Image: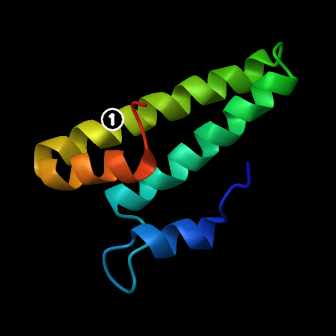
């Protein structure tokens, strides 16, 4: 699987021209990192220090999704579909 670069993700999910840190962009960046680490664990199943980092990233994404759900539920549902989260 080919992962997207940070610039590509920001261009795809930004709301305005100078937007680099909105909730949607942060969730998309974390999702890309989580997918990359998931593939990493297929090769290195005993890498427990990276596994801890993965759980921290998943928790951070969950917090951001909860915030987005509270502030703009329609945008949250659309983002979940675009990122194919919750398979």
Residue 72 can be seen in this image: no
Say which quarter of the image contains residue 43: top right
Location of residue 6 with respect to 32 vertically, above or below: below
Q: Is residue 32 left or right of residue 82?
A: right
Say which quarter of the image contains residue 59: top left
Location of residue 8 with respect to 37 vertically, above or below: below
Residue 13 can be seen in this image: yes
Give coordinates of residue 56: x percent, y percent: 53, 28
Tell which of 76 and 56 is nearer to you. Answer: 76
Give coordinates of residue 46: x percent, y percent: 83, 13
- Tell me how many marks there are: 1
Q: Residue at x 67, y 65 (%)?
A: 5
Say which quarter of the image contains residue 86: top left
Q: Please, which residue is most extreme toward the right here?
A: 43
Q: Residue at x 34, y 47 (%)?
A: 81
Rendered image coloring scheme = rainbow
* Mark 1 Cα shell of 10 Å, populated few (<14), some (14-19), many (≥20): few
Q: Please, which residue is most extreme toward the bottom here?
A: 17
Give coordinates of residue 74: x percent, y percent: 14, 52
Q: Residue at x 74, y 33 (%)?
A: 39
Give coordinates of residue 6: x percent, y percent: 62, 65
Location of residue 31 with respect to 25 vertically, above or below: above
Which residue in the structure is indicated by mark 1?
Answer: 63
Q: Is residue 27 left or right of residue 2?
A: left
Q: Quadrant of the C terminus?
A: top left
Q: Residue at x 47, y 53 (%)?
A: 28
Helix, strand or loop at mark 1 = helix
């Amino acid at each position: 699987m080919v992962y997207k670069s940070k610039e590509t993700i920001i261009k795809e999910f930004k709301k305005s021209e100078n937007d680099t840190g909105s909730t949607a962009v942060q969730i998309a960046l974390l999702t890309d990192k989580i997918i990359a680490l998931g593939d990493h664990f297929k090769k290195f199943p005993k890498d427990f220090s990276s596994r801890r980092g993965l759980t921290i990233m998943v928790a951070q994404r969950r917090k951001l999704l909860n915030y987005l759900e509270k502030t703009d539920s329609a945008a949250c549902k659309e983002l979940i579909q675009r990122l194919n989260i919750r398979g």
